[in-house]
Image: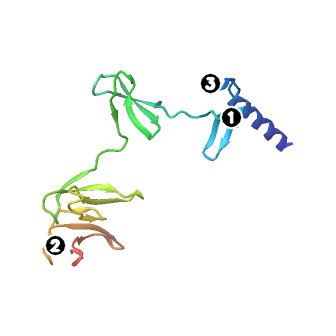
């Protein structure tokens, strides 16, 4: 009984997905087909006609209204789904071409890089999503630390940067120099 009801629901869903639309190439009927990347519309005259069209169009459709004004035309900004992922764009597209990335810019700590003395340390994320702090002069300067930096001098070696390190006894400051690693008291 449960299998029969499940099959009926599945058939109803399949029927709802099918669209009564002719193939633009040969005039045959378009049908829902399934491939390794998911469902798509294909011509019923396959293999004579190899017309296919994706079922989900990633053409910049609106996902959510953000309620903020566009900096160019003062229309509303919206969250859109494009073929390269989510982005923020103007609701009056294509008249206004303003877009913004979803990620925010790196947080600048205003701490001078102890290695090159030109750049500042900024927070970044690794490809696995873990936060770290690195010099903004990369690739010229490759200085990076995994913990939050603190602009203080090490009492042992005099290195101009300490990091906040978690221990069982609490958070302590440790020298960021790889040769020292002295824990401050």
What residue would you read off at disc 1?
32
What residue would you read off at disc 3?
24
**Residue nearest the observer in this picture, 104 or 60:** 60
Q: Residues within 10 Å of mark 2 (few under 14, many from 20)?
A: many
Mark 3 vs 2: CB contact within 8 A: no
Q: Quadrant of the C terminus?
A: bottom left
Q: Earlier in the sequence, mark 3 or mark 2?
A: 3
Q: In the figure, is residue 59 to the left or right of 141?
A: right
**Residue nearest the observer in this picture, 6 or 182:** 6
SS for dot 3: loop
Count of numbered labels shown in the rendering = 3
Q: In the figure, is residue 49 to the left or right of 71?
A: right
Residue 26: x and y, percent? 67, 25
Cα separation, mark 3 vs mark 1, equals 15 Å
Q: Earlier in the sequence, mark 3 or mark 1?
A: 3
Q: Residue 23 sits in which quadrant?
A: top right
The answer to whether residue 154 is above or below residue 119 is below
Q: In the figure, is residue 21 to the left or right of 127?
A: right
What residue would you read off at disc 2?
154
Residue 19: x and y, percent? 68, 26
């Amino acid at each position: 009984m449960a299998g029969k009801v499940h099959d009926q629901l599945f058939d109803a869903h399949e029927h709802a997905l099918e669209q009564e639309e002719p193939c633009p190439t040969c005039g045959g009927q378009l049908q829902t087909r399934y491939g390794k990347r998911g469902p798509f519309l294909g011509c019923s005259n396959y293999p004579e006609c190899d017309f296919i069209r994706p079922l989900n169009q990633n053409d910049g459709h609106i996902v959510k209204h953000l309620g903020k004004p566009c900096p160019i035309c003062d229309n509303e900004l919206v969250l859109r789904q494009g073929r390269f992922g989510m982005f923020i764009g103007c609701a009056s597209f294509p008249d206004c071409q303003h877009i913004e990335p979803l990620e925010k810019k790196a947080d600048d700590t205003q701490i001078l890089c102890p290695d090159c003395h030109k750049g500042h340390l900024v927070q970044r994320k690794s490809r696995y999503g873990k936060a770290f702090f690195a010099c903004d002069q990369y690739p010229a300067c490759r200085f990076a630390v995994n913990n939050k930096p603190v602009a203080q001098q090490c009492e042992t070696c005099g290195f101009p940067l300490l990091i906040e390190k978690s221990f069982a006894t609490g958070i302590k400051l440790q020298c960021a120099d790889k040769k020292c690693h002295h824990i401050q008291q």
